[in-house]
Image: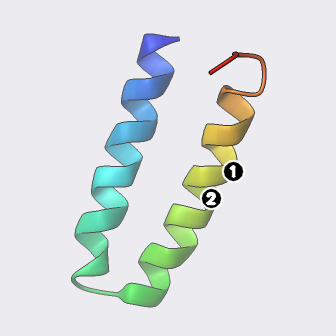
């Protein structure tokens, strides 16, 4: 699942970068990314 974690990290970094340009749009992206992150790690004990 390392690839999934890296993918999530990439999305977070991208969303954070977008925050500098468009706060509302980045908020939507971050929300979606967090949902994906929870789905990815639902089957993994952290």
Q: Label 2: few (<14), some or many (≥20) within 10 Å? A: few
Picture residue at 77% right of the left edge, 17% below the top: 43
According to the picture, the residue beneath numbered tag 1 turns out to be 35
Picture residue at 70% right of the left edge, 16% below the top: 45
In this rendering, is residue 43 above or below 15? above
Residue 9 location (% of width, % of height) = 36, 39
In this rendering, is residue 7 above or below 43? below
- Where does the C terminus fall, quadrant-wise? top right
According to the picture, the residue beneath numbered tag 2 turns out to be 32
In this rendering, is residue 6 above or below 14? above
4 left or right of 37? Answer: left
Q: Secondary structure at mark 1?
A: helix
Residue 31 location (% of width, % of height) = 60, 65
The disc placed on residue 24 is none
In this rendering, is residue 2 above or below 36? above
20 left or right of 34? Answer: left
Residue extending furthest toward the top: 1
Which quadrant of the structure image shows residue 17?
A: bottom left
Residue 15 location (% of width, % of height) = 36, 63
Q: Secondary structure at mark 2?
A: helix
Q: Distance between the Cα atoms at labels 2 and 1?
A: 5 Å
Q: Nearer the viewer, residue 36 or 46?
A: 46
Picture residue at 61% right of the left edge, 40% below the top: 37
Picture residue at 28% right of the left edge, 52% below the top: 13
Assess whether mark 1 and mark 2 are in contact (beta carbons under 8 angstroms): yes
Residue extending furthest toward the front: 46
């Amino acid at each position: 699942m390392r690839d999934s974690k890296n993918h999530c990290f990439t999305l977070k970094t991208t969303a954070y970068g977008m925050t500098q340009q468009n706060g509302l749009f980045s908020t939507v992206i971050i929300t979606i990314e967090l949902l994906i992150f929870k789905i990815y790690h639902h089957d993994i004990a952290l």
